[in-house]
Image (cartoon, rainbow, N blue to C red):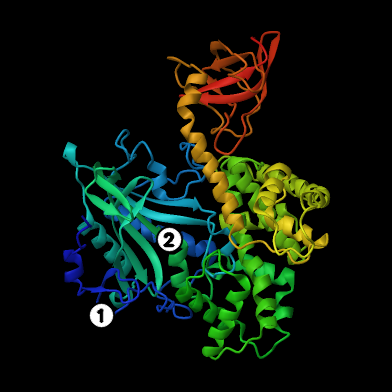
Amino acid sequence: MALPPIDLAVFHENGYVRRQCRVTSLWFWTTDPNRDTCGDTSEDEYSFIGAPLIGGYEQRGKALKDAMREAFLGFFEASKHTRIQPYPVLARWRDDIHLTIASIADFQPHVTSGEVLPPANPLTISQPCIRLTDVDAVGRSGRHLTTFEMMAHHVFNRADDGEFLYWMEECVQYCHEMLTVTFGIDSGEITYVENPWCGGGNAGAAVEVIVGGLELATLVFMDMEEHPEGDVELKGDRYRTMPLQIIDTGYGLERFCWAAAGTPTIYEAIYPETVAWLKELAGFDDVAQQWPSLNLDRLLGEMSRLNGIMNIEAGVDGDELVQIFLSRLAERGVEVTAEQFSAVTEPLANIYAIPDHLHALCNMLGDGLVPSNAKAGYLARMLARRVLRMRDELSVEVSLADLAAHHLDVNLGNHINKQTREGLLTILQLEEERYEEMLRKGKNVIQTQLKDVRKDAASIPDESLFTMNDSHGLAPDMAIALARAAGWTEVQLRTGFSAEMAERHAKFAKEAAKMDDDKGSVYPVGDYTATQTLYYDDVSMKTFDAEVIGIIPLSKDQSPSNASHAIILNASAFYPEGGGQEGDYGHVVQGSTSVQVLDTQVAGGVILHLCDGCP
């Protein structure tokens, strides 16, 4: 059985008709009875480049984001939704993901399963999110980001308890009113595309909201769960109705800003000061002035429109893509040579990507993450080293810490939760020192790892890249650069490989989550009360007072760190392994006795300090 059409009164009342897309075959609602594409196809260009769709916003950058966010949240507050504060970007409440990838992730798994009540119902939020699946496309596509804010309104309906707030009709009505009244978008520019959503074991009908060729929002009506005997089949899986009916919406803050600014790329809309600063430091205007007849703004604008219809994603062949662009640009009357295209777009890609990566990095470190070679720590290190490599390619002589300080000042407003500004910048200073050390050692690693690879090889084996990254901290793109310098001049990094590395580490998180039940048996915490966590209150805390409420002798199987006992305290500032960080270590002191904490683990909310003795 398939899902029924999403036929709502709000569509008919506003003059919409239902059509089937000639390109995608999806059904959509439009005010134009002659329209035959849904608005998000290979034939639908971005119509807002140079012609903003949202009027009344002259700001750019942080001021624009602040104004747009407040307009959204204010609308839903006035519509009786409770505004709640965003969650951290480190999903410490989840074992299956490292980073908060969507606003609904804030409420998984306990709220969405019905086990725990939501903090408010209905609610509205603007949640900072980080997704690294498109990291290779950032800066090149004109629209991709690794970090963004997902504005949302959520409803958690429990029909079995008689608590049913609203569903499709009201949800789409809220969306349409907000777009047309609050943001002044003409109804004729909006198409509502029916496209069922499924993921993470859940599914539901969904409406994608397309404006000017750009997807601004997705409205998901999550009311099904995967089950082999389910009566609904979506994308090869079967689903049945679940106890909760959840409205899961997502509105892209940065995309709203882009539609209001009408700039050639999304980066000029949200990071204008940093883009201008980096252009000046890199001498980009000198590059562009080599060809006075080249209209750079038009070139970038046409490229953005092309990105909109070509759906450029990571994984395409780079050389082939350039030729496609040159051909399509020529069709539009923009004559540019391959040399000009490369000279302009290569440095711009770095200039655009640096503020995006810095934004993700500052958010991650601001939430207490420390770069490392494992878990979410690896993701932070990867972003830091990508920024450093891009900086070096631009010949910009500014330290990583100074780049971050600029970003905090103009783009983030020092809004960091669990880390001090000084602490964050110190971490990045140390990270740059490790990067330089990695470059020195990397030359020897390259010679060892590539001893069996021909000098004229076009690529490095994937497993060699994985090994150099995981064992030596040598990021894939840096390995390629060092290999070229060492004589492997033809090697190139396969497009999308960095995203695969990020996905590899995300997969490790999911595998670790499956072992949670086993870990609970390895550390038998019995009826001990969950430990009060102090590390979120003060990330710089070095000492604290607590009560010893239990001591568990450990076998060798229970303690890879060779600890003999697990000490349980009523409160602790020791951060247990998880959330992308290794477990803390230090000392537990009682009177004149001191024992060393070799590792910190957690089971059932109880923090275990794995020590070399008893106090």
User: Which quarter of the rendered picture does the N terminus lie within?
Assistant: bottom left
State the residue in front, 108 or 366: 108
Up the image or down, 597 lies above or below 511; here it is: above
Up the image or down, 368 lies above or below 410; here it is: above
How crowded is the residue under tag 2: few (<14 C-alpha within 10 Å), some, or many (20+)? some
What's the residue type where badge 1 is placed? Asp
The spot of residue 407 in percent (x, y) is 63, 57
Please name the residue shown 44% across and 77% down the image: 46
How crowded is the residue under tag 1: few (<14 C-alpha within 10 Å), some, or many (20+)? some
Determine the CA span between mark 1 and mark 2: 25 Å
**Image side of residue 562 versus residue 395, left or right:** left
State the residue in front, 338 or 537: 338
What's the residue type where badge 2 is placed? Gly
Please name the residue shown 56% across and 89% down the image: 330
Identify the image quadrant of residue 256. Answer: bottom left
The spot of residue 101 in percent (x, y) is 47, 50
**Disc 1, disc 2: CB below 8 Å?**
no
Circle 1: element type: loop
